Image (cartoon, rainbow, N blue to C red):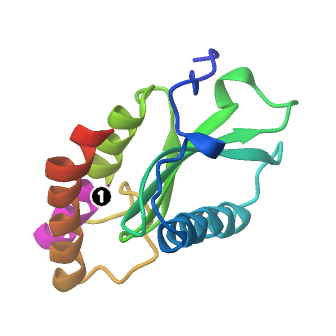
Amino acid sequence: MSARIDTSRFPAGKDLDYEGEEERRRLAALTDEAWSFVRGWRWDPPVAELVLAFAVAPILGLFLMRFAPGGRPEDAERWVVVGDLPAMHFETDEARTPARALELCCAIAQDWANGVLAGRDLSDSYPFPIDPTRANAERLLDRVEFIRENLIPLA
């Protein structure tokens, strides 16, 4: 898909409704975490910006990663999720809104956790940088449930 995601309804600048310095610091920490995560990958073209799409700091931050001009239009953007779950990035084709991106994030995490619990080969699952243990899978499923029940309705 070559049309860029409409970010006009994303929180931005002074429109962020954070009440105090501690909340702003937590949001800044999520933003720093997202930048650290994307800088850990090689991108061609390079990342031009991260646009905050949704956040409940320090629990979860969803960012739209946009690349510098020069690549294929259909590869111009990706979602990035950081916070209280393993960081991930994924395509925007099937997730054109923050709520849909969080749904896809949950599906990706659930696939990995279910694979671990079932003893499946994880080569076709998202490559989370955590040990594929029962405890990690159950913890991830708890986070997925929390995101589905509490955060997606807010997005």
Identity of the residue drawn at 76% across and 39% down: 67
Viewport quadrant of the N terminus: top right
What residue sits 34% from the left and 33% below the top? Answer: 100
Q: Which residues are magenta?
A: 109-120
Q: For the residue labelled by badge 1, is the local secondary structure a helix, a strand or a loop?
A: helix
- Amino acid type of the residue tagged 1 in the rendering: Ala
Residue named by callout 1: 109
Residue 126 percent coordinates (x, y): 41, 58
Q: Quadrant of the C terminus?
A: top left
Question: Residue 12 location, x and y as percent?
Answer: 60, 40
Crowd around label 1: few <14 · some 14–19 · many ≥20 (10 Å): many
Look at the picture and state if 53 lies above or below 119.
above
Task: Please tell me in which quadrant of the rendered image residue 143 appears.
Answer: bottom left
Residue 95 x, y percent position in the rendering: 41, 30
Tell me: 46 left or right of 11.
right
- Residue drawn at the location 18% of the way across and 51% of the way down: 150
- Where's residue 131, x and y in %? 35, 84
Q: Main secondary structure of the magenta part?
A: helix
